[in-house]
Amino acid sequence: HTNQPQGHLNGKPAKLEDTNPDLIAPAGNMAMSLHDWSAFCLDQMAGAQGHGRLLTQASYRLMQTVQPGGGSAGLGWGIQPSLAGHAGPVLMHAGSDGTGYAAVALFPASGRGLLVAANASDEMGGAKGARDVMMALMKSYP
């Protein structure tokens, strides 16, 4: 995790051993920059419109479709009909490594989306703060 914002736990910068164990860590504790994450999200939205560059069209469709018995879950995406009064479909994902929190809401039909990240653990308010910021931004979303 070099050259990246560092998570925090108990008010102090976190160490790698403070994050989730590899068994339950997101992507095996791999991380990406916000720039790369936004590029991935843009590609996911392009894929929803048939213009993605990373995967086959069938793979985008599979990832972004509610799976049988999955409630509102695709493969990695939560799929909602709307969010905060904005029509979807909305591709959602959120998670934490125990020392920070990140969330994304993508609206492929309009080509818009939000990425929010906090480098603070839950007990420091990271998840709540990030969710609150996302909802505040959604209120001003055109």
Image (cartoon, rainbow, N blue to C red):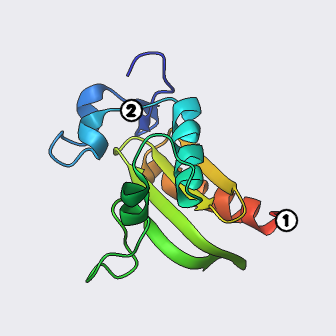
The residue beneath circle 1 is 142
| Residue 134 in sight from this viewpoint | yes
The quadrant of the rendering that contains the N terminus is: top left
Q: Which of the 4 quarters of the picture holds residue 31?
A: top left
In screen coordinates, is 49 left or right of 123?
right
Q: At 37% across and 72% down in the image, what residue appears?
A: 73
Q: Which of the 4 quarters of the picture holds residue 141?
A: bottom right
**Image coords of residue 47 (percent x, y):** 52, 53
Q: Is mark 1 on a helix, strand or loop?
A: loop
**Image coords of residue 102 (percent x, y):** 49, 48
The foreground one among 17 and 58 is 58
The quadrant of the rendering that contains the C terminus is: bottom right
**Image coords of residue 103 (percent x, y):** 52, 54
Position above or below: 39 against 78: above
| Amino acid type for the residue under numbered disc 2 | Ala
Q: Is mark 2 on a helix, strand or loop?
A: loop
Q: Residue 127 carries which label?
A: none
| Amino acid type for the residue under numbered disc 1 | Pro
The foreground one among 134 and 115 is 115
Position above or below: 141 against 41: below
